[in-house]
Each structure stands twice: as structure tokens, then as C-alpha cells.
Amino acid sequence: MYKNHTPLKPIYNKLTVIRQLTIMDNNQQRIVITGVGLAAPGADNLKDFRAQVLAGNSAIKEIELRYFGSAPAGICTFDETRYRKKRENKRGTRAGCLGVYCAHEALADAALSIDHYERSRIGVYVGLTEHGTVETENEIFNISNYNYDVKYWSHHHNPRTVLNNPAGEITMSLGITGPHYAIGAACAAGNASLIQGVQMLRLDEVDMALVGGISESPGSFGIFASFKAQGALAEAADPRQACRPFDMDRNGIVVSEGACIYVLERLDKALARGARIYGEIAGYCINSDARDFVLPYDKRQAECMQQALKRAGMEPGDIDIINTHATGTKQGDIEECKAIRQVFGEAPSTYINNTKSIIGHAMGAAGVLELAGNLPAFEDHLVHPTINVTNLDPECALPHMVLNTPVQLPSISTILNNSFGMVGINSVIIVNKYEE
Amino acid sequence: MTRDEIKDLILEIIKDIDEDADFDTLQSDLPLRDQLDLDSMDFLDIVMELRKRHKLQIPEADYPQLASLTSCVNYLEPLLKNI
């Protein structure tokens, strides 16, 4: 009788192999964050950044801008010559300098040697709101000292202003020979680059991706002047209180520097090398308002969140934290809150915060930098607060807004990050705490 | 400018480009690019600085004259004689 069972064994083994292959295949499609390098106004690494956002310590200060005068802004302080020489920083751009620092830091944080993966199979995808504005303004100012004689225009201008400059500077510094390019998606660019990295890994175009975003925007008087002309530039007697999303007295955006680069790997490879896993990309979406150059649109934002949830196989109630995009403009904050209300209603377990209130708007870096500040919540189960809310705008009021002090939860396993941008682009990323 | 002043000018410009540049073993008659960590963009920086500091417009055809420290001085001496 037992002998009759013997032939079944190979079949069982075959099924087991098929199941294991399915899991393996699935793990090749599951993409995880295994390293984070960042520079934010007030912090140059994730540990300090987390402490800063939990404490709600704003590092916004007044800066002086050419032609414009003073304005509140976020400026990063980090060891600019830790990973390359001063002459390379002088030749390159501020965005490149920020990117090189963060890329090296991300690899170090991931405990990854650059030679772990074949260098031609590493992709570098960098999100930028704009690039070249700072360099062009500087060159025009330079030739103004020579009666606008273009013979004094720098030969460095073109390599500094090509859109792939920051990503390219990262590849040069690390000797990466795989693809590198910029993702231009206004202030959704950081999230868009993360999505690009996920897709390239799933398509087997690369084995590891360095993704993120960079902002050097405080170097441009024109960006401040344009926001001012639009009536969207923040002002405050105390610059630390200038960025105040959801507050009745909010009066605009605080322009910040910032950069954040993630190491993305396939789950199977990350597990094989015993990597620490910050989180898994569970869902995402990018869509377009197709409506207005600057005004946001709650309906499309809601659709973007709904689509990301659908792709993640989640219901609104599954989300523990919504890290909002809100920049502190009158209409923008209201539109996002309307969109959240449409999707989440009165979802009792979803907490809402905002990182810009602490670091300002780091433009192309905003999505990834703000998400990074929330990733440690999977471990410490804290929701960092939105600061500077003394008088909550009733039109922004939502259940479980975390205002001014952090909230401790029993556990946190999902974060939804919103990042929206001009000319009607919306992006949503959902990250899960990694579980087998 | 004397020949020594022109030499100092070139070395000062190179130092501005690369503060780690080491001139201790620099041989005046050998090409600068063979001895220092300079590339074509750095070379254009030298040309631009000469333009900015002394209004010198060096034609592209003459760039080879700036290969070594000695050839730089030889080329620039008549151009900078009244400075």
C-alpha cells in the first residue's frame, strides 16, 4: 500500500519546485528600498532627519537672493567634499554635488559595494522639477560684468545645464556604466523617478537602481520671483513659521534645497545578501489633470490615489499614514484635502501628516525626501507631525491630522505619499513594511 | 609683465582650477596636461581667465602655444608687455 504512494513523491517535488519558482519569480517582481542617502535643510542622514521631523524642528531661514532680496528658504549643510574633490564640485552643479553625496550615502547605508552588481546593470534615475535655471542665471549675471559680451559666457554652461547633469555626475563619481537620465515631472519628479526605477527593475533592464530627486532651486532668484508674482511665496516674521500647510494663515511656498537617493533592489537579491529592507513598493500611479498650468485639481488627485490603491490591492482603510503634498498655498492645500476626503472619507485608521511644514518644498526631491522621513515609522510606529498649525483651516480639516506633536500608534505598515506638480501632474506611491 | 610674473599668473589660474595642483616637480618645457590633472575643459578655463583678467582674446589656432609653461610665457610675453 505504501509503495503505491511512492510515485507521488516526484509529483509532490515537482509541485514544490513550481511553487518555489513562482515565489522566486514573484520576488523578482517585488521591489524594495534597501538604502537611503539624503540631504535636507537640517539633516544630512536619515537618522538625524527622522529625529528632526519627529521633533518638528524647522531649519528654514532667511536667505539673500540676487536682485530679489530676502526670503525664507531651506538650505542643506553636508560634507560636500566627502565623496569628491572641491574642483569637481566647482566644475559641476550644486544639484550634482547634492546627488553625488546622496548616492554614495545611499550605497553606504545599503551596505552595498558598487561592484556588488555589474556596473552596466545599474540604472540612475533622478527626478528634477527644473534644471539649468540656476546655472543660466549665474552666466547672465557673469556676462553682465562684461557688458553682456557673450565671449565671456562659460564653456561649462552646456554640460552643467543638460537635463541629465545631476544623474550623469552620479555615474561619473561612482563609475556606473548603466543607463542614467533625468525624469522631469515638476514637483512629482522624485516619486516619478522612484516609479521609473521600479519599472526598469521589473523589466529586467537593470539589477539595481539609484532613484530619487534633487532640488537646487534656492540658487535661482527667478523661482522666488515667479512664485512671488503668482502670490504663492511664503512670508513670515520668523522663517521657521513660514511654511504652514493647512493653517488659516498660510501664505505660500517655502523654496528649499534637498536631495534624496534610494537604493532599489529586487526582493530576491536583497534577501540573498541579507539586506536591511526599509520598505516595499506596493503601488503607484501618475496621472494628469489636463486642465491648468498651475491650479491643482482634486478629482484627478483622488483618481491617482484610487489607482495606486487598486494596484496595491488595498482599500483606503489599509493605509496607516498619508504623507501629504500640501505646500502651504491657499487653494493647493484645500484641493488635496478634498481629494483625500473623496477617497478616504472617514477612514478611522489613516493618519495624515505633512513634511514640508518642517523642511519647506524641496521641489524635485520633495516626494522621495518626505517619504524617507516617514519610512522609519515602520520601526518606531510614530507619525511625525505637521508643524505651524495654530488655526486649522476648516476646509482642510480631516480626521486624524497629526498636528504639532507626533502620534504613537500600535503599529504602522503602510504609507501613502502624495506628490503633485505644475502643469497638472499627480503622483502617488504606496510603500509597505516588508513582510514575507 | 615680466616672464616670471606671467609664469606666476598661469600657476595662479591653475591653482584656482585645482587647489591640489602640485607644482614642485613641474617641468616648464613639458606639456602641462602631461604633468597636472588638467583636461580640455580646464584648458578652456585658463583661456577664459586670461580673457577676464587681461582682456586677451586668444584665437583657437593659437591654443597649442599654451601647451607648456615655457610656451605660455613665450606666447603671452608680447601680449602682456604693457601690463
Image (spheres, rainbow, N blue to C red):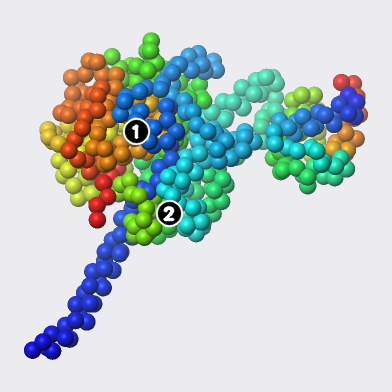
Amino acid type at circle 1 is Arg
Q: Residue furthest left?
A: A1
- Whether callout 2 and callout 1 share a subunit is answered yes
The residue nearer to you, when weighing A172 against A311, is A172
Q: Mark 2 lies on which chain?
A: A
**Residue B26: image location, x then y, percent:** 82, 41
- Asked whether residue A109 appears in the rendered view, the answer is yes
- Tag 1 secondary structure: helix
Quickly name the residue at label 1: A50
For the image shown, how many numbered marks are present on the structure? Answer: 2
Q: Which chain carries label 1?
A: A
Quickly name the residue at label 2: A208
- Asked whether residue A303 appears in the rendered view, the answer is no
Rendered position, A114 above or below A187:
below
Q: Residue at left 24%, top 34%?
A: A382
First reached walking from the N terminus: tag 2 or tag 1: 1
Q: Quadrant of residue A23?
A: bottom left
**How many residues crowd mark 2 within 10 Å: few (<14), some (14–19), many (20+)?**
many
**Residue A420: image location, x then y, percent:** 33, 34
Relative to A242, A389 lies left or right: left
Closer to us: mark 2 or mark 1? 1
Circles 2 and 1, Cβ within 8 Å, touching? The answer is no
Relative to A420, A177 lies left or right: right
- Tag 2 secondary structure: strand
Q: Quadrant of the C terminus of chain A?
A: bottom left
**How many residues crowd mark 1 within 10 Å: few (<14), some (14–19), many (20+)?**
some
Relative to A142, A311 lies left or right: left
